Structures are given as C-alpha cells and as structure tokens.
Image: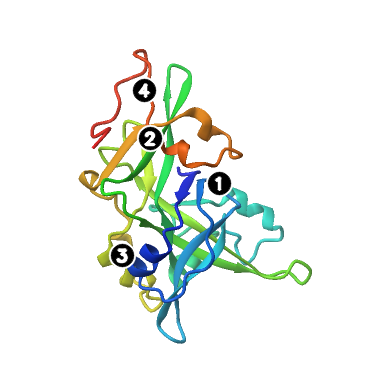
C-alpha cells in the first residue's frame, strides 16, 4: 500500500535522471494524495523519446463508466497486475515511471498509527513502476491517469508495513518503458523490492495525516515514545 508521496520539484535533476528534454511546471508537494496530479515519465512511441507529463494519480480503466473509480485504483499488486481487468492492458502496453522524492507509510502500534518517511539514502529522486491509461468521455473530455505497482516489503520497510512500492533501478527504466516489451515474465522480474541498503526511513509528525498540511516541515524527523515498538533498522542512515 502507498497512499502518500513527496514531490520536491527538482526540475533539473528530474530532467537529467529520467533523460527528458522538457519538464512540465511542477509545484513542490510534500503530501501528495490520490486524485492529485503527479509527474510521470512515459515513452512517446512515435519518436521513441521520453516525455514527462502530469497525470492524475488513480488509474481510470478505459472501460470505466465513472471516473470516480480511479480513487480506488492507486496501487496495483505485482503478483496480479498481469491478470486484473483494471490493469492488465496497461501492464502490456502503457507502462510509465512515477517520479517521487519519497513516500509515507504508517506503522500500526498499540492502536495508533505512526507515520514514517521513506526515501533514498542519498536523498535522490527515484521512480515507482507505474501504469497509465487514457479515459475519454464526450462531456468531460480525456483524462490521463496512473497507478503504481506494489510488492513485498524489503527489510527496512517491513517493520512498518508488509508491502512497498516497486522502486525501479535506473538500469531498468528502458525495459520498463519499452511498449514492444510484452514478455510478462521478463517484466515481472523487475517487480521486486529495492535493496534495503539503498534506502532510509524515520518517523515524522502526524501532521502528515491531513492532506491539507503541505510544507517541508512534514519531512522533519520526530522522536517516538518509549511505548512504541523499536524503529526500523537504518532509521537515521
């Protein structure tokens, strides 16, 4: 499960890391929630070049009668993404990179939920394995939307939650974006947990619980009470 993420709008770094010439106007968002716009990288098939665009987070299948279904389609499971009707066509033909600078997850302890920031140890941007879809309505017009793929948690995330987003290694970007790559087995090989040693995590304020709160202070580490279970390994690495 992943329901919140961070976009710091590092435009130049995004352009370099994801090999795109043009980056859309991006406003920093320290508490991105489903249904909001997020930066996505996809391959323009005609030109075989990457482009970065803004999509709605929450995939709306082409066959959907109501776009509201997207609010329930923010994540796809790696083990079922190739078969689920909502995601299987996008998995075959419309894969993308969902850009992020971190994400939040909540640890359930003693009847409470403690939020944690999770990101790269070197604080670099990264990409979730994503899917995108185009939904068209004669009255509302076209809506492009996306969802990220989740897998089993690695050692650093598992104490917080049993699942985590698939974070792709840069060497896998080309294969993941290639629309001619339709070998489900080879694609599934990419849908694995990122090695824990590349990541860090630490507890943050419950201010992040409210979507309305959106400021850099949400990323500040906080101390957790002695009654809370021990923090994950690598807390302040």
Q: Nearer the viewer, residue 218 or 164?
A: 218
Which residue does the image show at 38% across and 71% down from the upper left?
Answer: 177
Q: Which residue bears the numbered disc 4?
A: 223
Observer-side mark, 2 or 3, equals: 2
Q: Earlier in the sequence, mark 4 or mark 3?
A: 3
Residue 111 numbered tag: none
Q: Distance between the residues labelled 4 and 1?
A: 25 Å
From what the image shows, is residue 49 above or below residue 212? below
For residue 184, which quarter of the picture? Answer: bottom left
Name the quarter where the N terminus is drawn.
Answer: top left
Task: Determine the residue located farthest toward the left in the rendered image.
Answer: 197
Residue 211 position by quadrant = top right
- The image position of residue 12, as x and y in percent, is 39, 66
Q: What element carries label 3?
A: helix
Whether residue 66 sits left or right of residue 97 in the image: it is right
User: How many residues crowd around disc 4 within 10 Å: few (fewer than 14), some, or many (20 or more)?
Assistant: few
Q: Mark 1 points at which residue?
A: 33
Question: Disc 2 marks which residue?
Answer: 161
| Disc nearest the viewer among 2 and 1 | 1
Sequence-first tag of 2 and 4 = 2
Residue contact at pointers 2 and 4, CB within 8 angstroms: no
What's the distance in space between the residues labelled 2 and 4, CA to CA?
A: 19 Å
- Could you tell me which secondary element the residue under label 2 belongs to? loop
Question: Which residue is labeled 3 in the image?
Answer: 185
Q: Is residue 26 visible?
A: yes
């Amino acid at each position: 499960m992943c329901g919140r993420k961070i976009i710091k709008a590092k435009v130049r770094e995004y352009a370099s890391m994801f090999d795109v010439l043009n980056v859309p106007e991006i406003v920093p968002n320290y508490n991105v929630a489903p249904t909001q716009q997020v930066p996505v990288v996809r391959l323009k098939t005609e030109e075989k070049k990457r482009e970065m665009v803004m999509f709605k987070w929450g995939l709306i299948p082409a066959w959907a009668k109501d776009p509201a279904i997207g609010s329930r389609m923010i994540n796809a499971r790696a083990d079922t993404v190739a078969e689920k009707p909502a995601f299987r066509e996008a998995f075959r033909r419309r894969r993308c990179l969902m850009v992020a600078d971190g994400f939040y997850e909540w640890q359930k302890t003693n009847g409470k939920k403690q939020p944690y920031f999770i990101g790269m140890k070197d604080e670099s941007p990264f990409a979730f394995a994503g899917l995108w879809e185009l939904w068209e309505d004669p009255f509302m017009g076209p809506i492009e939307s996306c969802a990220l793929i989740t897998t089993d948690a690695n050692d650093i995330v598992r104490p917080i939650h049993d699942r985590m987003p698939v974070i792709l290694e840069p060497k896998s970007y080309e294969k993941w974006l290639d629309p001619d790559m339709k070998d489900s087995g080879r694609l599934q090989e990419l849908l694995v947990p990122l090695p824990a040693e590349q990541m860090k995590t630490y507890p943050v304020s419950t201010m992040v619980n409210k979507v309305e709160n959106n400021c850099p202070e949400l990323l500040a580490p906080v101390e957790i009470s002695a009654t809370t279970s021990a923090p994950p390994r690598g807390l302040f690495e």
